Image (cartoon, coloured by chain):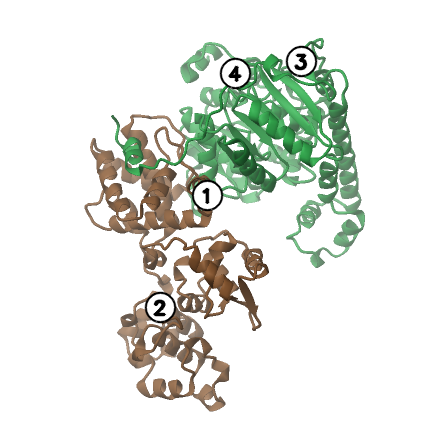
Amino acid sequence: MDPEDLLHLLDDQQARRLRVIENLLRGRKTVSTLYWGQRYDLLFLLGLAKHLDRGGLDATAQALVSQKLATWTPNEQPQLRLTAKGRQRRDQVPTYQPQTRALWPQLSLAVARQRLLLSVQVVSQYAHRTARYYPLTTDLATRQAVRQWFHQAKSPDLATRIFTALTASLTQLPEKTAQVLTAGFSGYQQPGLTNQQLAVDLHQTPWEIYLRHVDGVVRIAQDARQADHPLHALLAPAWQTAVTRSAQATLRAVTTTALTLDQVATQRQIKPSTVREHLLEAAIMLPVTALPYERLLPQATRQTLLAALPAQLDDWEYTALPADLQARFDFFTFRLLAIWCDKGGAGHAGTPND
Amino acid sequence: MLEPLTTSLQTVFGYSEFRAGQKAALTALEAGHDTLAVLPTGAGKTLIYQLYGYRHPGCVLIVSPLLALMTDQVNRMRLAGFRRVAAITSLTSYGERQSILAHLEQYQFLFLSPEMLAQPAMLARLGQLTLSLLVIDEAHCIVQWGPDFRPEYLLLGAIREKLGSPLTLMLTATADHATKGEIAKQLRTTPTVVTESLDRPNIFLDVEPVANDAAKRERLLALVTQLVFPGVIYFSSKQLATDMAQWLRDQTGLAVAAYHAGLSSEDRFKIQQQFMQGDLAVICATSAFGMGIDKNDVRYVIHYHLPADLGSYAQEMGRAGRDGQPSLAVLLYTPGDERLPLTLNQANRPDDATIQRFYAHPQAFSRNDPGIALLTFYLQHGISATAVQALFERREKERGHALAQMLAYVREPCCLRARWLAAFDETAPAHHEACCAPGKVPIDLTDLGLKRQAPTPPTPVAPDWQAQLRRLLVAD
């Protein structure tokens, strides 16, 4: 990631923890990372750079600071805030805004990408009647899935149907994004360009090219949710709910029974704290209707806490609450209330930009 | 009675004749002799075990040191028509590994990294197989890499015995007399040695001393601007390969790409295929590039750094001119270039004090340090501190000697070819004009027939993506 890419993930009103951005990219789904990812509106970054090292953004951040585009704010954890100059630069050079980003946490990107790229290669070679070629290097699961799909889907008009379907998907995207996706495909007499090469040719950063590429893959995978799409059998299984299976089971136990959270923990044989983490994860990643907020946050609780908390969500601090309130309400309740407010509960203004 | 070798060759590959060395190696194997084949790059070493595997029941087990390239090898085997092929390395996912292990009997060719082979569970599983042949690929790594990087290669002798001492083929492109002896000793065998001349008469050898880094860059640019392509330039680091690829692209307008182990497998695939297809004029590479690139018409190989020894140099520059046409190998040398291999030589080894402290308190050290990981390995295998010290000392001396030979090549005033081949106990043909240009002799690219006529611009991104998508998916 270049400094100008990081610039677009920062704000002048809201100081942001670099570690949160790093952990999002690395796909670390702790409640704290997810909560702040939600507050920064950066959840789409989840798992986009799984190979990023810990501290892998430090040098990039430091470059912004030395160019006086951002400053560190002293805090428990280092936070970055854009300077006026930084904000000006950010607004002058707009970055790519992926159309499908709200869907990204719900798609297993690695699965969808590998399957799409390999199937396009296989179909391209098949359409041109090439039997011997180097297949893209993918994992065994992808190879098996594509092989199985291809045996069932093979027909004289398969390539044409895929061409039509891909064209329909790509037409909905900006021209340049369609170019990026198409030029990155490997197939008959086309090795495919790398993101680095595309970045040079299109005068964009490799990160922007990558965002375009992901946008294209997600658009195609979204269209392939239709049962009559030629890639449906291959790509539909790549969709998942945005929360882990274990958290889904906890949520189910909470919503379908009258058990207390501690009773749910006993029933599910997990720690009481894990039940609470699962619920927070679900609260962040799912729509506001998915959780029984009325039960978890009774009105009296909300009123008491809201009366004691600052208006701006980002200024909330559990440890700053009066001791008697800390004794009455645990951190879970405090955090859940924040998520509820962030999602517009009680008409609360979510982000400081609103 | 088996069919004649040439009949198998015709059936499997459609060739009527073997290349030099292939038949001798196969004949020795067919007679049941362990075989060490020292054949130059491009001689078709893979064919030897492919054909042997075709002719005999059981599994051919290939031990290969290069993790990232093993998948390429599997793909190439499939491309050649061998379907029952698999590779297990530390990069193989757990699920994939389980799946391969569950069907192990079905594979005709199995590629393993030395680390995997050294695991007792894996070894036990392999013990249940009928091995028709054990292949040690890049066998010189036993000597070259063993003590510093891949201690597992040192276990190969013991592992081979545990597997019941199967018939063994050792392959390498480069081995002097001492290395051959060491390979045989480590693997506890007395192999039939098949050797072909390493010389590549169609490659013109050139050493060019330059005053400093700036002059080196300028000379590189001049060469890349004038030479016919495709060409490969080797660098000492990923960063340098990446930066120089960009710089050369900006300066020359040519299609230049970087290739190194830091790229994703998808990007490596794309760059390789672009190069094979002729889309790229120049590749800026680290030593990760090469093994497994079957491109015949590479016209030049330039080294921007000093290789650590003549063996690796010969292997890398040998990727030029496999089609037998005139080609060029240039080594750019700045005084002091030997400091890098020298430093690497020393940096890789823990010093004597560390060894002593480690053996006294092994728990007090972090395994994340590669030097400590190496010492842990030796400790676990019952090698004493004194023996480890001796091992490191000997190794450092050997590497020092290898580097001295490399420098002697760079400073050779008369005939580079003679100097190179002498290091491998070979006598070069008499020096002539189309042989080489040592440091003080200028080269004339026109005379060599390697000067480029008209420049060619790179292929840009197609602006009309719909037409591109149609070409990809819809046959005319």
* Amino acid identity at mark 3: Cys
The residue carrying pointer 1 sits among few (fewer than 14), some (14 to 19) or many (20 or more) residues within 10 Å by Cα, namely some
What residue would you read off at disc 2?
A: A282
Which chain does the numbered disc 4 sit on? B
Q: In this view of the protein, which residue sits in the foreground, A63 or A24?
A: A63
Q: Position of residue A127 (x, y in %)?
A: 27, 29
* Rendered position, B125 above or below B131: below
Q: Is residue B310 left or right of residue A327?
A: right
Disc 1 to disc 3, how far (Cα)?
49 Å
Q: Are marks 2 and 1 in contact (CB under 8 Å)?
A: no
Q: Kindly identify which residue carries mark 1.
A: B97
Depth check, mark 2 against mark 1: the one in front is: 2
Q: Which residue is mark 4?
A: B323
What's the distance in space between the residues labelled 4 and 2, CA to CA?
Answer: 62 Å
Subunit of label 3: B
Which residue is at 40% across, 41% downward?
A: A140
Q: Mark 3 — residue?
A: B435
